[in-house]
Amino acid sequence: MERRRFKQTSPLDLRLEEQAKHLRKEAQGTPPGIEREKLIRRAKRVETAAHLQQSLTSPGLKSPT
């Protein structure tokens, strides 16, 4: 069985930032409640993942010695 491979057209951190924007926009249109809070929490997690990705791929990152 062969794995399906995809060539990504944009970097991971940009895709994560776009997803976070989309989630926040969706949360704005949702009435206050549990569903809105879930969307906001998910957006925060995606933003954190984007920041981590940027930190890990930054040229200034040095390996611990």
Image (tube, rainbow, N blue to C red):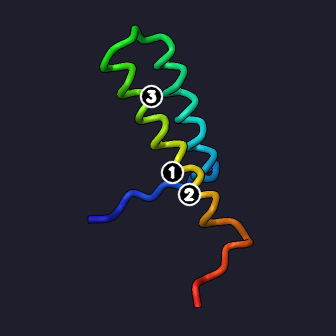
User: In the shown orientation, is residue 4 left or right of residue 6?
Assistant: left
Three-letter code for the amino acid on which mark 1 is drawn: Ala
Crowdedness near tag 3: few (<14), some (14–19) or many (≥20) residues, C-alpha within 10 Å: some
Above or below, 22 relative to 6: above
| CA gap, disc 3 and disc 2 | 18 Å
In the rendered image, residue 44, in percent from the top left (x then y), is placed at: 49, 38
- Residue drawn 64% across the image and 49% down it: 10
Mark 3 / mark 2, whichever is N-terminal = 3
Which residue is under mark 3? 40
Q: Secondary structure at mark 3?
A: helix
| CA gap, disc 3 and disc 1 | 14 Å
Three-letter code for the amino acid on which mark 2 is drawn: Leu
CB under 8 Å between callouts 3 and 2? no
Which residue is under mark 2? 52
- Seen as rendered, the residue at the extreme right is 60
CB under 8 Å between callouts 2 and 1? yes
Mark 3 / mark 1, whichever is N-terminal = 3
In the rendered image, residue 3, in percent from the top left (x then y), is placed at: 35, 62
